[in-house]
Every structure is written in C-alpha cells, then in structure tokens.
Amino acid sequence: MAQGKLLYAQSGGVTAVINATASAVIQTARARKVKVLAARNGILGALAEDLIDTSRESMASIRALAHTPGGAFGSCRFKLKSLEADRGRYERLLDVLRAHDVRYFLYNGGNDSADTALKVSRLAAEFDYPLACIGVPKTVDNDLAVTDCCPGFGSAAKFTAVSVREAALDVAAMAETSTKVFVYEAMGRHAGWLAAAAGLAGEGRDDAPHLILFPERPYDEAGFLAKVQATVDRVGYCVVVASEGIQTADGRFVADAGGGKDSFGHTQLGGVASFLAGRVKDALGLKVHWTLPDYLQRSARHLASKTDLDQAQAVGRKAVEYALKGMNAVMPVIVRTSDTPYRWKIEPAPLEKVANHEKKMPAGFIRRDGHGITPAARRYLEPLVRGEAPPPYGRDGLPRYVSLKNVPVRRKLPPFEG
C-alpha cells in the first residue's frame, strides 16, 4: 500500500483511557513517519471534512494524552446505516479520505464503530481505493465480542469497586442512627459487567455490596425488598448495586428515562437508583441514600487501572502496526493467556466477528441466587483492576491534564449537506 496519511477518530462514550490509545496511535505513527489526522467529533467530523492536524502538537502534549481523560478530539453518538441506506454519506466519507490522501482509517469505539469501519472497508474495496480500516476497541461496558476485555472497562471497574467499598464503610458507620440502605447505580445497558465489578469490594456473605442487580436477571420487586429487609436485619445495613439496564420479566427497563432513543437506537436510561431508593423507603420505611455516578465512572482517570492503561496503549500501537502492514477490516483484541499469573497479548480479529455482537456476562459469573458474583467472575475481574497509574499533580493539588491546540486542516471539498 502506498504511504499516505492516517485518520483517527473517537466514537461513542469516552473512557478514562481512550486518550491513552490516541497517544499510542500518534506516537507509533510518528515513529514511522506517517502523518496523523484526527476527525473532530468522530465520524461527523470526517463527513464534514473537519479534520485536525496532530503534527502541530508537541510530543510532550501527545505523551500527556496518556494521563488525560475525556476525548481529546471530540466523540459523537452517531451511527451510519447500511451501505445502501446511507450511500451518500459513505461516498462522501470516501471523498474526504481521497482528498487528504488517507490510506489508513482507525475508528476507536465499540460495536457500532466496528460495524462502521467494516462497511467503510467494503466501500473502499468496491471503489478500488487502497484503504486499511482498523477498528480499535473501547468501551466501559465491556460488551465487545472476541476480546477478553475492553480498554476503558478496567478503570471504570476499579472506580466502581473502590467507590462501593468506601461508601459501604460510610454507611456502616452511620447505620445505627441514620442510613440503613445505600443504592449505587452502575452503567450497563444489557450487560452487567460494571455492576459485577462492584462485587470485588467485598468477599464474605456480609460484606458490601450485599445485593447486585444484573440486567441478565429479571427484576423481581417483591424478592428484592425481602432481601433488603433480611440483610438489614442480619447485618444492620444493606448496600445495593444496580445496573442501569435492569428489566422486569416482561422486558421493560426499570430506569427508562423517557428521553426517547439516540442515533444508535438506545433508550435513554437513568434513575434506577432513585427508583429503588423510593421503593425501599415507601415499602420498608427505611432511611435510604442513593447515588448516580454516571460520567464519573468513565472519566475517573485519577483512579485508572494500570492494567487498563497498558492495554489501551497496546491496542493503539497494534492498530497502527496492522494498518501499515496492509491488514484490513480487523481489530486488535486482548487475548488472556493465563489467570495466575495474569498474562495477555494482542491479536488481530476480523471485524465481522466483532461488529454488532454483544458479549454478556456468562451465566457462571452470576451467583445462583442472582444477586452476587461467583469465584469465576472474581478470577476474571481482579486482574483488570490491578495496578495504579495516577496522573501527575500540580502545586494546586489537582491533576495536570493537557488541552491540545487541535489545529484544523484546510478543507478541500465543498460543504456536505447530507
């Protein structure tokens, strides 16, 4: 493949370490004398020809991305439809790639992003345009198929487990005269990986969290309330972790926020903790506190997992290496080779096996009573949250994060009205 430019874009909800992947991509490409452009706000920036010249950033700034949360170039929740239904947009994207001599396209996201990268690779082949399309994994939900885990999940899992353990100590201290029940809401639409990570906070029967509600199990209110009361009677208090995606037996989201659907077709969720807290208060008469950490789960770079950081950088490096080798329609995925000691490696996987497939919690990871994790789940989860990778701190006591200049590339095409 002729040497050209590399276009990198971020998609969907960002993570504490997605910029670490971006940093690895840019550093690896620079070492091989390949210029990297970034699309502002993901695929929307590519369509609008709103591109950023990363060569205008200093190496110090690019390195500092590795400890900076958020999405340095902007992300978006926007899904291209099929090649037939969105033909105009795909052809516009190809026009932009041609105009800027982009021969390598790296899309850093989840299932839908893998699907987009796959479709772009097929369109490029149809038009005989030499283009290597690489999907780069990222998601705090840990629901990508094939890969053992997803960069971004380990740090969110660490934040969740630490937060639940610390909050539980607070509740235990106050339970005699104040709060009896604490409800923590974890992200997870269809897969309860983050809720499961909360289970790392305790080991014994009476350790918090006492109840975990998974989207893989139907929500039974009567059974839930009975277990809360039994736990309070036995332990003195009860800590509940609930996935935002829990559903009733008839498939209705308990936390449907009534905000319609986004461009990915996802129902807006939020508020399951407040709902459960209200039911506990009304039905059991107990004092309840609840929390919705929401974006905090995926932005908490100060509490990132070292394992997660290492993996986020590794998939970025491999993505560039695969592209420069001429590999196409693949994703660098994490392969676990050993639990004890924990070892892993990166291998390429066809995007066809990743795109639009969802990895849910294995049945063997959920305790038989449906409200906790098994030893198998603990063996899987523990290595992913190990190690600390704190950002540098300034004299003001706050992390020193970087803000890029994000210098735009001169446009060469007419504005897109699609």
Image: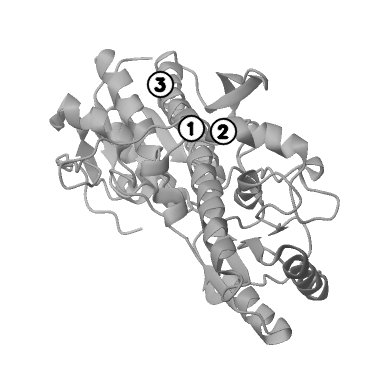
Amino acid type, residue under disc 1 in the picture: Asp
Q: Which mark is residue 137?
A: none
Mark 1, other Cα within 10 Å: few <14 / some 14–19 / many ≥20 = many
Q: Residue at x 72, y 62 (%)?
A: 235
Q: Position of residue 267 (x, y in %)?
A: 58, 67
Above/below status of 313 relative to 145: above
The secondary structure type at the circle numbered 1 is helix
Mark 2, other Cα within 10 Å: few <14 / some 14–19 / many ≥20 = many
The secondary structure type at the circle numbered 3 is helix
- Which dot, 2 or 3, sits closer to the camera? 2
Mark 3, other Cα within 10 Å: few <14 / some 14–19 / many ≥20 = many
Q: Position of residue 65 (x, y in %)?
A: 28, 35
Q: Position of residue 101 (x, y in %)?
A: 27, 28
Compare residues 279 and 309 and report the one nearer the observer: 279
Pointer 3 or 1: first along the chain:
1
User: Where's the N terminus, which quadrant?
Assistant: top left
Q: Which residue is mark 3?
A: 317
Q: Which residue is mark 1?
A: 308
Compare residues 71 and 194 and report the one nearer the observer: 194
> Relative to 300, is 392 on the left or the right?
left
Confirm or deny contact between disc 1 and disc 2 (CB under 8 A). Answer: yes
Amino acid type, residue under disc 3 in the picture: Arg
Q: Residue at x 35, y 25 (%)?
A: 24
Real-space Cα separation, disc 3 to disc 1, in angstroms? 14 Å
Pointer 2 or 3: first along the chain:
3
Real-space Cα separation, disc 2 to disc 3, in angstroms? 20 Å
Q: Which residue is mark 2?
A: 384
The secondary structure type at the circle numbered 2 is helix
- In this rendering, does residue 37 appear at all? yes
Amino acid type, residue under disc 2 in the picture: Leu
Pointer 1 or 2: first along the chain:
1
